[in-house]
Image: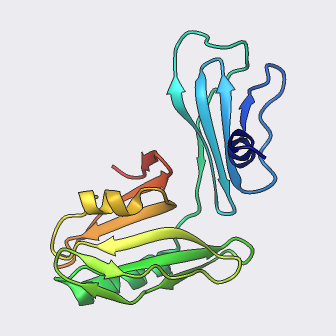
Amino acid sequence: MNKDQFIQSLCPTLPVSVEHPISRPEKPGTRFWVANNGLWVEISRPWMYLLQPVATRNEALTPFGTINTPILELPRLPRAVMEEFVEAAREACPNEIGCWVFWNPETREARLVRYEQKTSTDAIQYDRPAPLPGESLVWDIHSHGRYDAYFSPTDNKDDFGDTKIAIVIGNMDKTEYSLTARFISREITIPLNG
């Protein structure tokens, strides 16, 4: 198998049918779709599904079919898991704190993992924890202590290349905390609030 065949086996590029809708993939992976309204990426994981344009034009580019609507399907973070993290973040304030939440699509259970970490008022150093069999990393959550919730340049660098939901909470010294969230997959970033 040459390099081109190998790349196509990992990320096939397909024309959109003019007669039939796109059928969802049977297994996790990434596919690119060439439509008459642009190039679309389809990413499927056990816990999420995305169909998103990566390059679009208003005039017809190809003789292929059209994809009309982007799709993003994500699980909801269980309230109890978020409350557990907020409590830990308030205790750690003014330092930052982080956790990962793994999801098991068969049991539909979320597991919060507070990994080993070194924290300060503006940074976290940690080793990435491993999921249990059947689990996927879905949520990467960290706090900003007394500062507002936002994605810093360090967060952007840390998130690059992952497929996950990233959440930052801030103002942990106040009654009302701030929160920002985004979905990330490869080069795609989709804000989930605000």
Indicate left or right for 155 with 16 as reference: left
Q: Name the foreground residue: 146 vs 137.
A: 137
**Residue in view at x 61 percent, y 10 percent:** 60
Classify 90 as above or below 39. Answer: below
Indicate left or right for 87 with 75 as reference: left
Classify 37 as above or below 143. Answer: above
Classify 43 as above or below 107. Answer: above
Colour mapping = rainbow
Q: Name the foreground residue: 35 vs 139.
A: 35
**Residue in view at x 82 percent, y 53 percent:** 26
Percent position of residue 19, x then y: 84, 21
Q: Name the foreground residue: 166 vs 129.
A: 129
Classify 32 as above or below 130. Answer: above
Indicate left or right for 177 with 117 as reference: left
**Residue in view at x 79 percent, y 31 percent:** 21
Percent position of residue 25, x then y: 78, 48
Q: Is residue 150 visible?
A: no
| Most distant residue in the top direction | 59
Quarter-of-image position of residue 152: bottom left
Percent position of residue 176, x then y: 23, 71
Q: Please state the total of marks drawn on the protein image.
A: 0
Q: Is residue 23 visible?
A: yes
Q: Name the foreground residue: 15 vs 59.
A: 15
Percent position of residue 66, x then y: 68, 21
Indicate left or right for 132 with 96 as reference: right
**Residue in view at x 24 percent, y 70 percent:** 170
